[in-house]
Image: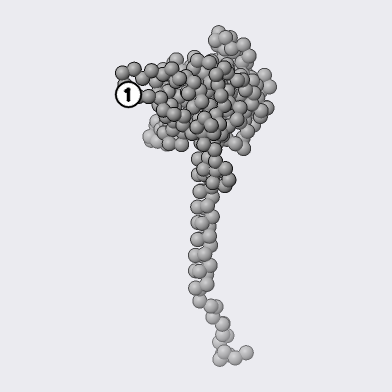
Amino acid sequence: MMVASGNDAANVFAEAIDGSNETFALRMNEKATELGLTVTHFCNPSGLHDDAHVSTARELAMLADHAMKNDQFREIVSLRSYVMPPTNKHPYLGWALLINSNKLLTFGDTAFRSDYVARYTGIKTGTTGYAGNCLVAASELVDGRELISVLLGVPGSAAGNSYNSTYTLINAAAQIVLQDYDPGQTETTVPPATPAPSLTPSLTTTPATTATSGQPTGSESDSGSNQTTAQPGYTEPTSETGIKETSGISGFITTNPWRMAFILLVLFLIALYIRGNFQFKKKHNKRPGKKRSVQPGSNGRK
């Protein structure tokens, strides 16, 4: 459920605990009230669309902050992958390999490396046709503090932008949080701003350790627009703050690592197709011509 984002697994959990999805949703709403979530309302354990299933970016951040205090939850949401153990139906190890749907965990050390972030620690993706691409992320900063960001409503056609935008959001918030960072007796100093893979306008941060951006309709909204809130002392990253802008074809390709990988894959497949087609024609042309059939007794004459 938490690694491969399986809705069926969420339903199994709910039914095992309370007998039905509806009964378990009542338990979820009781917990939401206990945590002070005044807008959030759950209708099912998976997050699939329901008009009454709503939340906000801020309340999802509050919920994530509470969940990350659970050591088992924290361990699960930080897994990059998980090898399924043997079962009565699959009596061998590794019958399935689950890859975490959160690409910040998979590519955090490369495509999303930041001088402010020590490592990414979670948390969960969520995508529906109504809600768009959503991502609740957590990262441990170089001073040991943890930031939680919430991004909601990224259009489905721009799935990769949820990671690029989250990277930019966390990086901008980290600059604010680390302004008073004291490395103590070590020689570590806060480095300058790290350029983001791509620029995303209308970023939002919240005070303390929560940075949120998104639309108030929550994980199940059918609106693609993002509402933002400006925070005191915050300046949107531009080229003047250290983020390098790129333009033209090269900028279009290089600013998004997922786009670059997709383009390279398409070029490779095209080259593979051309090569295979050329070899087929070459082999076909080398075939000997058809021999003229001669009927017995005709001496080859008509």
Q: Residues within 10 Å of mark 1 (few under 14, many from 20)?
A: few
- Residue at 60% of width from left, 30% of height from top? 201
Q: Is residue 258 left or right of residue 218?
A: left
Q: Amino acid at mark 1?
A: Glu
Height in image: 8 above or below 253? above
Q: How many marks?
A: 1
Q: Nearer the viewer, residue 141 or 8?
A: 141
The answer to whether residue 165 is visible is: no
Q: Dividing the picture into quarters, in which one does residue 97 lie?
A: top left
Q: Nearer the viewer, residue 131 or 120?
A: 120
Q: Position of residue 49 (x, y in %)?
A: 64, 25
Q: Dividing the picture into quarters, in which one does residue 33 lie?
A: top right
Q: Nearer the viewer, residue 22 or 122?
A: 122
- Residue at 49% of width from left, 27% of height from top? 171
Q: Position of residue 66 (x, y in %)?
A: 49, 14
The answer to whether residue 31 is visible is: yes
Q: Is residue 226 left or right of residue 256?
A: right
Q: Position of residue 6 (x, y in %)?
A: 53, 29
Height in image: 82 above or below 297? above
Q: Position of residue 209 (x, y in %)?
A: 49, 17
- Residue at 61% of width from left, 15% of height from top? 40
| Position of the C terminus by quadrant | bottom right
- Residue at 44% of width from left, 15% of height from top? 69
Q: Is residue 53 left or right of residue 242?
A: right
Q: Is residue 280 left or right of residue 80?
A: right
Q: Which residue is mark 1?
A: 187
Q: Dividing the picture into quarters, in which one does residue 106 lie?
A: top left
